[in-house]
Amino acid sequence: MYNNDPKRVATGEVRLSYAHLNEAYANPMQPGAKPRYSVTLLIPKSDTETKRQIDDAMSAAYEYGVVNKWKGARPSMKSPLIYDGDGVRPNGQPFGAECKGCWVITASSGRKPGVCDINNPNTPLLPQDIYSGMYARVTMSFYNPAQGNPVACSLDNVFKTRDGEPLSGGPSTSQDFAGLGVTPAPAAAPGVAPQATATPGAYGQQFAPGAINPLTGQPIQ
């Protein structure tokens, strides 16, 4: 429960994947689909409190529909809202490595969500500092849509907690400029070549054209 609404949840820290938070996105594999802002949350299975809150909020939204929408009827869920990242997608293919050890759920909205740093909620983040792979806390609501599943997950707001290895695209500005202005390392002694140090790949995991969405099993464009 969040803000006294049993259908709302404020998650613990999660990792963001397939983040379409700066611009609305429509899956080209679904003709006629309306562009929406969306993000997939990778919730560590160790965060049992967030999982419990999600289960409770889904149940509260369903019971609200029974009383207020469906005149006592109890329609079946056509597809689950939350998936086991250690399992398989509906098409039988396994989830990506980034989903292992996590619960996986996608939230979306026709309204652009607020995205800010959790320590400064009054200042929106720059678009280049919002990316798949960063860590955040997310507020979301469960509701009864006009069609499809009896219960759906709506994206409310995103509070970035820290940077992470990008899952797509380039590095964020905070990563590019990390360490600038600090005291430089001492110069190597004359005649002694400095040792090379390995650095992680700037772009992290890449999704080439044709990569598969972990929930739908459809190609990513």
Image: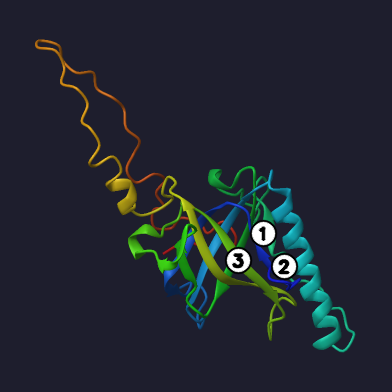
Residue 79 - label:
2
Are the residues flagged by discs 1 and 2 in contact, CB closer than 8 Å?
yes
User: In the image, what residue type sits under mark 2?
Assistant: Ser
Label 2 sits on a secondary structure element that is: loop
Residue 209 lies left or right of residue 194; in this view the side is right
Q: Position of residue 13 (x, y in %)?
A: 58, 51
Residue at the location (73% across, 72% down)? 4
Residue 216 in sight in this render? no
Q: Position of residue 209 (x, y in %)?
A: 39, 58
Which residue position holds label 1? 90
Q: Is residue 130 above or below residue 141?
A: above
Residue at the location (60% across, 60% down)? 215
Sooner in the amino-acid sequence: mark 1 or mark 2: 2
User: In the image, what residue type sits under mark 3?
Assistant: Thr
- Kindly report the distance in space between the C-alpha atoms of the residues bearing marks 2 and 3: 22 Å
Binning the other alpha carbons within 10 Å of mark 1 as few (below 14), some (14 to 19) or many (20 upward) gives: some
Label 1 sits on a secondary structure element that is: loop
Binning the other alpha carbons within 10 Å of mark 3 as few (below 14), some (14 to 19) or many (20 upward) gives: some
- Kindly report the distance in space between the C-alpha atoms of the residues bearing marks 3 and 1: 26 Å
Residue at the location (68% across, 47% down)? 47
Binning the other alpha carbons within 10 Å of mark 2 as few (below 14), some (14 to 19) or many (20 upward) gives: few
Residue 139 - label:
3
Q: Is residue 168 above or below residue 193?
A: below
- Kindly report the distance in space between the C-alpha atoms of the residues bearing marks 1 and 2: 9 Å
Camera-side residue: 8 or 170? 8
Tell which tag, 3 or 1, sits nearer the viewer: 3
Q: Residue furthest top?
A: 191
Q: Residue furthest right?
A: 72
Q: Position of residue 135 (x, y in %)?
A: 50, 51
